[in-house]
Image (cartoon, rainbow, N blue to C red):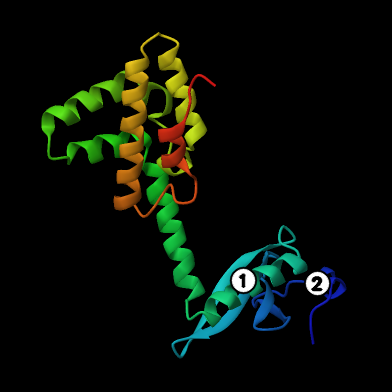
Amino acid sequence: MPLTDLQIRNLRPEPGNPVRLYDQHGLYLEVSPTGRTYWRWKYRYAGKEKRLALGVYPEISLKDARLRCEEARKLLSARVDPLQQRKKEKLLQTQQAGETFEKVGREWYGKQAEPDHSKRVLSRLERDVFPFVGDRPVAEIEAPELVSVFRRIEARGVRETVHRAKQDGAYLVTGVNASNGDLFEGSGTVELLIEADVSA
């Protein structure tokens, strides 16, 4: 029988042992002896029983816990282990947080086949781009941010540099897409960089 909010509010910890109240589809609420209350989901994947943490009550309500459980069940129905999927997502977030625009730019252009060209490009980026967005996580940068950087360059009256900086940014973003798991996927960054009219 599904849980109710009243049951949850009346739940009290027991010394020595966790208390568990089951909802449905494997979702349950666990109260530790110290009184901390956790949502968990019990499921089976590849013949093994597993448990997925879904949050702490009351920060996560009964309704929210059911929604999270449903999302996890959809993954399971697609033959994806929700626990492993979460680990992958956390790992990707950690990696992306450390991948700044400057770090990725230096690494990517450093691997190109024409050292002289790469050196010129990096020189432009160091002068005109990295000071403004270089320390930003690359996965969080969107095209309008780079366009604002190009407008700074244009304000100096060097339109040729603006044009080259737009090309550099587009090539860099394309390279990041190819080598770092499509960090800009769906953002339209490449198209906006190429087509952007910085005078607008």
- Disc 1 marks which residue? 71
**Where does residue 132 sit, x and y in percent of width and height?**
42, 23
Which residue does the image show at 69% across and 79% down from the upper left?
20
Q: Quadrant of the C terminus?
A: top right
Report the mark closest to the observer, 2 or 1: 1
- Dot 2, how many residues are within 10 Å of its Cα: few (below 14), some (14-19), or many (20+)? some
**Where does residue 56 sit, x and y in percent of width and height?**
67, 62
Instruction: Say above or below: 106 vs 153.
Output: below
Label total for image: 2
47 left or right of 62 in image: left
Q: Indicate the secondary structure of the residue bearing disc 1.
A: helix
15 left or right of 145 in image: right
Which residue does the image show at 33% across and 44% down from the upper left?
174
166 left or right of 6 in image: left
Which residue does the image show at 41% across and 55% down from the upper left?
92
Q: Nearer the viewer, residue 102 or 175?
A: 175
**Label 2 sits on what residue type?**
Ile
Task: Check the image and name the residue furthest to the top.
Answer: 157
Q: Nearer the viewer, residue 67 or 183?
A: 183
- Disc 2 marks which residue? 8
**Where does residue 115 sit, x and y in percent of width and height?**
12, 32
**Where does residue 148 sit, x and y in percent of width and height?**
49, 24
